[in-house]
Image (cartoon, rainbow, N blue to C red):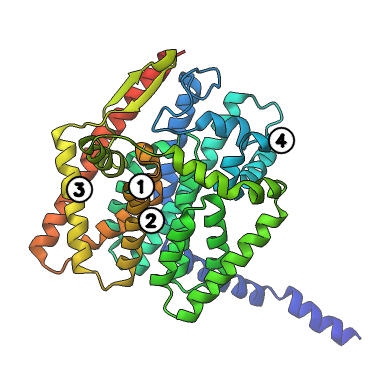
Amino acid sequence: MDKNLEVMKKRKFNRDISWEEIKQVLKSLEKKVSKYYGILFYMLITFIILFTLASVIKSKTNFYSENLKFRWKNILSYDDLLYSRYIYTVDQPYEEKVMHLSIHPFFDFMAQGVATIENLFFSNNNATDHYYHIVVFQILVNLLGVFYLYKILREELGLKEKWCFLTITIYEIATVTLLGTLIIESFLISGSLLILSYYYLSKQKIVISTILGILVSGMCITNSLAFAIMAIFLLRNKKDIIKVGISCIIGGILVFGILPYRDYIFNNFFTSVKTQAETYSLDHSFGTYIKMIFYNLGSAPIFFLNQIHTQPKGLDYLVFDLSASTKIIVLTIIFFICIIYNVIKNIKDRNMLAAFGVFMYNMFIHVIMKFGLHEGTIYGLHFLFAEILMFAFGFKIKNKVVRRIFISFAIILLIAQIRYNLDGMLNLLLLFKNWK
């Protein structure tokens, strides 16, 4: 008995063995984390900047206040007040937003969870604080998407670290991403989920990919086809494509069935989708139609365009003008020329095919079907990551001269974004400060 106790004590309290084991574990963890030191530091700096900007907006302007009268469908058509009042709340008026539930069935459930957690930490929460907390939550979701975008660039495209940081900075300072971290909407969360889906599909992680596919479809039903396109091109085994597809359909239906507002979804889904499509129908001249395509889907997601303050029916609206400076127009055209060049050169690469497929699908629904074309900028969060990936292939160009030209343009593009986008945000802040 004593001998057994002595052996147990040695095993339990032998400091030499325990410290060696601890050191080995720590070394193993340090080795795994060390390759992410750069991106983690980048994320920390980005969070500090965006968090500070959100805090300044909260303290120095009245934009987060629900008393501000210019809210609905104004800044790039973001329905920010709708989300803060009726979606990010524990007690939601489901009957008042059947159409939203049909298009974004899981989003409301997630938003209720966020609101519940918020109430646990902030008992005396007013409307302005509530809006601010949701913005901070979106900033964190955005950073998660940035982390996985970095991993895709590094692991799947094989880019050098410096080009990865240049690429994700272009992504972060794009108009739609920058505003998406400061104004409440569902598109930033949907876009981040698409990035995660791309990564895990490329890694052939069937279970995780299936869960993400269900979430992607539930957050924005139209993105289910974008997920399907990525699965077709990224999954190497045809059987895995079928498995993921069937599992997503069955899993989605099962999850729909346990939602508290399932009856609203099942009874109104097809009617809501039809009504939504009819709402977005356009009747413009061909010239205006082309301008909307170029600015709303091409330039505005990347560059901050001219802002116009209008007052139809006595209501304050702030919209982006269908125009831009010559510099922005030229840079936008060159940006897409780079993408077209990269697509042609890498059309057989599965990563290119997946990104190109997502982009073309979005062009189909927004350009051919004209769905949401007039507010295409916010939909840019659903395909911006695909544009960024197609653009990033330029860093792999074998011809040294062409590659240097591409790198030079990428740096110019970033400088132009900093110049115009941050200036545009500053003008918005000054406007919000004086707008009652």
Q: CB atoms at circles 4 and 2 under 8 Å apart?
A: no
Upstream in the sequence, badge 2 or badge 1? Answer: 2
Q: Position of residue 392 (x, y in %)?
A: 26, 59
**Residue 38 has which mark?**
2
User: Residue at left 38%, top 56%?
Assistant: 38
Between marks 4 and 2 in the image, the one whose residue lies nearer the viewer: 4
Secondary structure type for disc 4? loop
Q: Earlier in the sequence, mark 4 or mark 3?
A: 4
Q: Residues within 10 Å of mark 4 (few under 14, many from 20)?
A: few
Disc number at residue 91? Answer: 4
Q: Quadrant of the N terminus?
A: bottom right
Q: Quadrant of residue 66?
A: top right
Give me the C-alpha separation between circle 4 and circle 3. 48 Å
Residue 100 image point, x, y percent: 57, 41
Q: Residue at x 68, y 34 (%)?
A: 93
Q: Nearer the viewer, residue 306 or 149?
A: 306
- For the residue labelled by badge 2, is the local secondary structure a helix, a strand or a loop? helix
Report if the CB atoms under discs 3 and 1 are less than 8 Å apart: no
Left or right: residue 374 versus residue 403 is right
Residue type of the residue flagged with mark 4:
Asp
Instruction: Choose top left, top right, bottom left or bottom right for residue 112.
Output: top right
Q: Is residue 242 above or below residue 390?
A: below
Q: Which mark is residue 411?
A: 3
Residue named by callout 1: 366
Give how far apart the Cα atoms at labels 3 and 1 are.
30 Å
Checking the image for residue 120, the label placed there is: none
**How far apart, in angstroms, are the residues tagged by discs 4 and 2?**
42 Å
